[in-house]
Image (cartoon, rainbow, N blue to C red):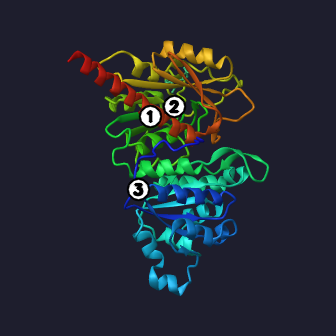
Amino acid sequence: MKKTKSSNNNQSLANKTILLIISGGVSAYKALELIRLIRKAGGRVRCILSKGGEQFVTPLSVSSLSGEQVYTDLWSLKDETEIGHIRLSREADLIVITPASANLIAKMAHGLADDLASTTLLAADKPIIIAPAMNHMMWGNPATQENVQKLQSRGIIQIGPAMGEMACNESGIGRMAEPEDIFDNILAFFREEKPLSGYKALVTSGPTYEPLDPVRFIGNRSSGKQGHAIAAALAEQGATVTLVTGPVALPDPAGVHTIHVETAAEMLEAAQNTLPVEIAICAAAVSDWTAKTISAHKIKKQEDNTPPALNLKENPDILATLSRPSAQRPPLVIGFAAETEDLLDNAKNKLTTKGCDWIIANDVGGNEKVFGSDKNHVYLVTKSGHEDWQPASKNDIARKLALHIAGHFEERHYKTTQKNIAAE
Ligand code: C5P
């Protein structure tokens, strides 16, 4: 989500202290711009520069821009008597790490404390925002992904990383988010009234498993990453979110009420139990069929090797059911369309056949891996047209969708207010 200009120029950060931790990475220079933006909005910035961070920006430039002493050394007696690593966190309202290197993320995930930055973070009692930045292979490494998921499940807010060219001449996901984006997220954090405060949202995610017998099942391929990211992004924007998820290997997103189910029937029941909601997003890869009868015992191989006949029946369509006109129909119902060909035409047809309001369409037939991957290329398809959202990380798409939904309700509210004024 690259922006050239912050959309929240008027909000003040007066009386807010941000502890900014700059770890090692080429993008450390972007932290300097972030310091400038925070100070311009009236905020105070205290900085910790890690040993790696010092290789990319100097303490002098950081202290000149922040107007404060820069902290670099855990063992500096002077710092410990004057302020100390505990007070650095206690006296801040928010901790922001830009860039968050793979190393610092790993230390946070595992509770290591071998320098000032990691020790302060282990002793921290304040919310933390991280803006990861690293080579795309480092980002995609299962070790980093596990570490990041751990941090997310502890409620740490993650911004980016974005797709694009890297300093090492490779390209992929790993570029640090732009300072304006990070700044907008800092403003959003301090905004008391979040754009989706007071809204209730339901998100379905993951696959469903339809049992054939106590051992076997049929199901779809789905990591749940996109659905889970959407649930987290809606919660970040202030919505009260219920996530109904099939079996996935992901932690429950922080701040989201998560219900675990296995089958489509259970998913439908749990989804209907959350109504009424204002927003329903069906991101689950629901199995189209389920077994007519589930064998009580493990189905045995036939002696003549004839495979057993699969006697299937159709599953309920959760998206179509929620979209049906009724007193409890959510005002905004969003479905997904994973297509291998004629993406936009199929997505538009789906709007009609399912009766939903928007479709997020993604091409799963191309060379790019979507299932289980961290990135996605989606189109927002509505009755009035479509928007190409360009390749981005699943987290960035989720955040963009949450903000788009907030904008939609803001516009609706504005239109209703105008209508009421005209009628008076
Ligand atoms: O019909 P198809 O599977 O292509 O439609 C995809 C959309 O419909 C997704 O939003 C998916 O979550 C939803 N769906 C559903 N219940 C089903 C099948 C699909 O909610 N039984």
Q: Quadrant of the C terminus?
A: top left
- Residue named by callout 2: 283
* Disc 3 residue type (three-letter): Leu
Query: Which image quadrant is residue 348 in?
Result: top right
Callout 2 secondary element = loop
Callout 1 secondary element = strand
Please report whichever mark, 3 or 2, sits nearer to the chain's N-terminal start: 3
Say the numbered circle drawn on residue 13.
Answer: 3
Q: Quadrant of the N terminus?
A: top right
* Disc 2 residue type (three-letter): Ala
Q: Residues within 10 Å of mark 1 (few under 14, many from 20)?
A: many
* Disc 1 residue type (three-letter): Val
The image shows residue 28 at horizontal and vertical percentages of: 64, 60
Vertical placement of 163 versus 370: above or below?
Answer: below
The image shows residue 296 at horizontal and vertical percentages of: 49, 31
Query: Which image quadrant is residue 98 in?
Result: bottom right
